[in-house]
């Protein structure tokens, strides 16, 4: 499995993988978490530690975008226009069903970050936002993590056929 130079670095210095996971979660969460959970099932990482790191990375990322919304008027105008254009149609949902809106937005590519920014813009308190965000974080971690982890566990079943897919 470790035919890649990247995997050798992970074997030599495992904290590199955890550090890249934190950075990856700030940029793109879905594919990063799927990949890390896949590699965790292959034995590259400790599951408990990885879950701890991923949870706090998602909290940090969501908090960052929430506070971008709080201070949106200090950013260039196009940031406010971008957030308004994408997230303003969801205002009714944000007010009436915030947990469901946050959860569904985590799975909708290109919508989640503007929703977080919008939640910061609409004068929600940070603690109210966290109370609504944490259940969606746990659900998202469980769904995407399970897909990656169990894909990794069943990888040996399809591994022999992958050489047909090589370019």
Image: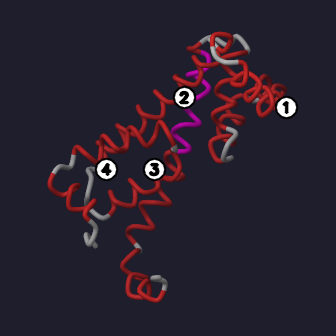
Disc 4 to disc 1, C-alpha distance: 38 Å
Disc 1 to disc 2, C-alpha distance: 20 Å
Quick check: marks 2 and 4 in contact, CB under 8 Å?
no
In the image, residue 155 lies at what x, y percent? 40, 74
Q: Nearer the viewer, residue 19 or 101?
A: 19
Disc 2 to disc 3, C-alpha distance: 15 Å
Of badges 2 and 4, the one in the foreground is: 2
Disc 1 to disc 3, C-alpha distance: 28 Å
Give the residue drawn at x 67%, y 18%.
76
**Residue 7 shown in magenta:** no
Q: Is residue 60 left or right of residue 143?
A: left
Of badges 4 and 1, the one in the foreground is: 1
Q: Which residue is mark 3?
A: 32
Q: Which residue is mark 1?
A: 89
Q: Which residue is mark 4?
A: 47
Binning the other alpha carbons within 10 Å of mark 4 as few (below 14), some (14 to 19) or many (20 upward) gives some
Q: Which residues are magenta?
A: 128-140
In the image, residue 128 lies at what x, y percent? 61, 16
Binning the other alpha carbons within 10 Å of mark 3 as few (below 14), some (14 to 19) or many (20 upward) gives many
Give the residue drawn at x 77%, y 34%.
86
Considering the numbered disc 2 on the image, is that residue within a helix, a strand or a loop?
helix
Lower sequence index among marks 2 and 4: 4
Lower sequence index among marks 4 and 3: 3
Q: Is residue 84 left or right of residue 135?
A: right
Image quarter for residue 84?
Answer: top right
Q: Nearer the viewer, residue 73 or 139?
A: 73
In the image, residue 50 lies at what x, y percent? 33, 45
Considering the numbered disc 3 on the image, is that residue within a helix, a strand or a loop?
helix
Q: Which residue is mark 2?
A: 62
Disc 2 to disc 4, C-alpha distance: 22 Å
Disc 4 to disc 3, C-alpha distance: 15 Å
Of badges 4 and 3, the one in the foreground is: 3
């Amino acid at each position: 499995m470790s035919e890649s130079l990247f995997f050798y670095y992970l074997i030599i210095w495992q904290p590199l993988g955890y550090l890249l996971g934190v950075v990856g979660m700030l940029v793109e969460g879905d594919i990063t978490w799927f990949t890390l959970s896949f590699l965790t099932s292959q034995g590259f990482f400790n599951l408990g530690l990885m879950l701890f790191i991923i949870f706090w990375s998602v909290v940090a990322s969501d908090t960052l975008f929430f506070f971008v919304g709080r201070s949106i008027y200090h950013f260039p105008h196009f940031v406010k226009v971008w957030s308004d254009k994408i997230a303003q149609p969801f205002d009714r949902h944000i007010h009436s069903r915030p947990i469901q809106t946050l959860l569904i937005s985590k799975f909708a590519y290109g919508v989640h970050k503007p929703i977080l920014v919008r939640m910061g813009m609409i004068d929600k308190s940070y603690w109210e936002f966290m109370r609504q965000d944490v259940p969606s974080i746990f659900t998202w971690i469980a769904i995407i993590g399970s897909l990656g982890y169990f894909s990794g566990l069943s990888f040996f079943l399809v591994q022999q056929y992958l050489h047909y897919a090589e370019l």
